[in-house]
Image: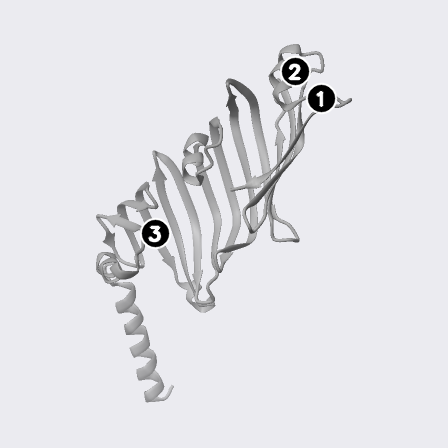
């Protein structure tokens, strides 16, 4: 290697070393004009590997935030992070890529939290719901404030909804993906609920139009109490299924 090239390489490595060793608290202070509605407390460590006692994001408080940076992301023009935190003692973890192209990708994300807490985060408080939500996000891609990739699954244990009276739905599962029209589609099914059979397709278009199509039916066609509970949906079809059809906006 020629001397100029060697000096340039060593200088570049030294500059990179200085950058990754920058205290996270110093960088956080520098970014104050661009932080928006994100507030961190007790920031420590470096931008390479650090932590914060808490994060306030859009009114939601996350505790025990920690992050580590993966160097291979720079080769793709991205900042690649592994992030973990907790929300009301519920653990959250994910890999996050933020690229110069403007693409942000969430992957290998695992979220466990009460459904009531998930409603608060998403502002979907149309009906009282209960149970425990397990969300596994293999990929969630966002660019220009639009979702361009989704691959995820979810499980809702001990699901229940309150329509004047509480309706227990058992355990539900959902497969979530992006269809050919760039709409988010969730296919929701029951997991051998003792009371109801459920098959529902929920679609969210990029203009926030929500469509729900499917059915719910008693597992036992002769279960009079179950039929009475579902009567608010109208009359059943010949198969004993109560049709669900809805269209609205978020």
**Picture quadrant of residue 79:** bottom left
> Within 10 Å of the Cα at label 2, are there few (<14), some (14-19), or many (20+) other Cα atoms?
many
> Within 10 Å of the Cα at label 3, are there few (<14), some (14-19), or many (20+) other Cα atoms?
many
In this rendering, position of residue 161 left or right of residue 121: right
User: Which one is earlier in the sequence, the residue at label 3 or at label 2?
Assistant: 3
Residue 53, given in percent of the width and then of the height, sits at 25, 44
Q: Is residue 194 visible?
A: no
Give residue 67's mark. 3
User: Where is 91 relative to 230, above or below?
Assistant: below
**Picture quadrant of residue 20:** bottom left
User: Which one is earlier in the sequence, the residue at label 1 or at label 2?
Assistant: 2
Residue 87, given in percent of the width and then of the height, sits at 35, 38
Q: Quadrant of the N terminus?
A: bottom left
Q: Are marks 3 and 2 in contact (CB under 8 Å)?
A: no
Residue at numbered disc 1 = 236
Residue at numbered disc 2 = 227
Give the structural element (helix, strand or loop) at label 2: helix
Q: Is residue 198 visible?
A: yes
Give residue 93's mark. none
User: Where is 150 relative to 223, above or below?
Assistant: below
Q: Are marks 1 and 2 in contact (CB under 8 Å)?
A: yes
């Amino acid at each position: 290697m020629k001397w100029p090239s060697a000096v340039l390489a060593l200088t570049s490595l030294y500059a990179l070393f200085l950058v990754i060793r920058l205290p996270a608290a110093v960088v956080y202070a520098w970014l104050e004009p661009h932080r928006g509605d994100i507030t961190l407390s007790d920031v420590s460590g470096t931008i390479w590997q650090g932590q914060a006692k808490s994060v306030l994001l859009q009114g939601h408080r996350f505790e025990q935030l920690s992050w580590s940076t993966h160097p291979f992301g720079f080769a793709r023009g991205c900042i690649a992070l592994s992030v973990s935190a907790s929300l009301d003692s519920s653990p959250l973890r994910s890999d996050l890529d933020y690229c110069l192209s403007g693409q942000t990708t969430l992957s290998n994300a695992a979220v466990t939290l009460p459904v009531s807490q998930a409603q608060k985060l998403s502002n979907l408080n149309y009906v009282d719901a209960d149970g425990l939500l397990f969300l596994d996000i293999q990929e969630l891609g966002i660019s220009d404030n639009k979702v361009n990739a989704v691959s995820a699954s979810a499980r809702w244990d001990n699901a229940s909804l309150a329509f004047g009276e509480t309706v227990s739905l058992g355990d539900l599962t959902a497969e979530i993906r992006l269809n050919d029209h760039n709409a988010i589609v969730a296919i929701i099914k029951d997991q051998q609920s003792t009371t109801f059979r459920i098959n529902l397709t929920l679609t969210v278009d990029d203009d926030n139009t929500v469509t729900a199509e499917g059915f719910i039916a008693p597992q036992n066609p002769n279960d009079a109490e179950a039929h009475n509970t579902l009567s608010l949906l109208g009359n059943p079809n010949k198969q004993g299924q109560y049709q669900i059809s809805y269209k609205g906006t978020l």
